Amino acid sequence: MKMGRLALIAIFGVAALGGLVIGSSTPADAWYCSARGTTGHSGWGRSVYLSHAKGIALRECAVRTPTYARCYIMYCT
């Protein structure tokens, strides 16, 4: 009788832990932004926050472009 009770507690514990894992944030919840420079170079960024994803994409693009070129956000999803 005692073993059946422990098994039941273990099953409910695993089910509760599974619910927490499923409910947690995933990479699909992040913003993905792409930036392109006037010289054709590009960069991308991913973050939970839209403003951070844009900033990362612009910095990645800026690293690859010459000093005189500009980078613009093409899209964010």
Image (tube, helix red, strand yellow):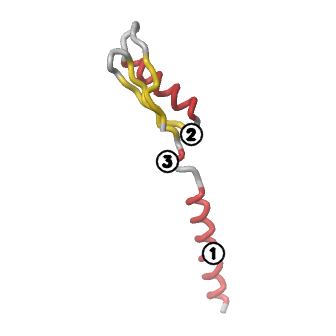
- Tell me residue 67's x, y (percent): 40, 8
Where is mark 2, residue-wise?
Answer: 48
Q: How far apart in space, not on screen, are marks 2 and 3 (Cα)?
A: 9 Å
Sequence order check, earlier mark of 1 and 3: 1
Residue 69 quadrant = top left
Badge 2 crowding class, 10 Å Cα cut-off, few under 14, some 14 to 19, many 20 or more, is some
Spot the residue most to the top: 68
Q: Which amino acid type is shown beneath numbered disc 2? A: Val
Local crowd at mark 1 within 10 Å, few (<14), some, or many (≥20)? few
Amino acid type assigned to the residue bearing label 3 in the image: Ala
Q: Residue at x 41, y 22 (%)?
A: 61
Q: For the point 59% across and 57% down, which residue is it?
A: 23
Report, in whole angstroms, how far the alpha carbon at label 1 lies from the one at label 3: 28 Å
Q: Earlier in the sequence, mark 1 or mark 2?
A: 1
Q: Is disc 2 placed on a helix, strand or loop?
A: loop
Query: Does residue 67 appear to the left or right of 19 in the view shown?
Result: left
Q: Name the spot of residue 20 as percent of width and height, x first.
A: 61, 60
The numbered mark at residue 28 is: 3
The residue that disc 1 covers is 12
Tell me where residue 37 appears, x and y as whole percent: 38, 18
Image quadrant in which you'd find residue 34 = top left
Per the image, label 1 sits on a secondary structure element best described as helix
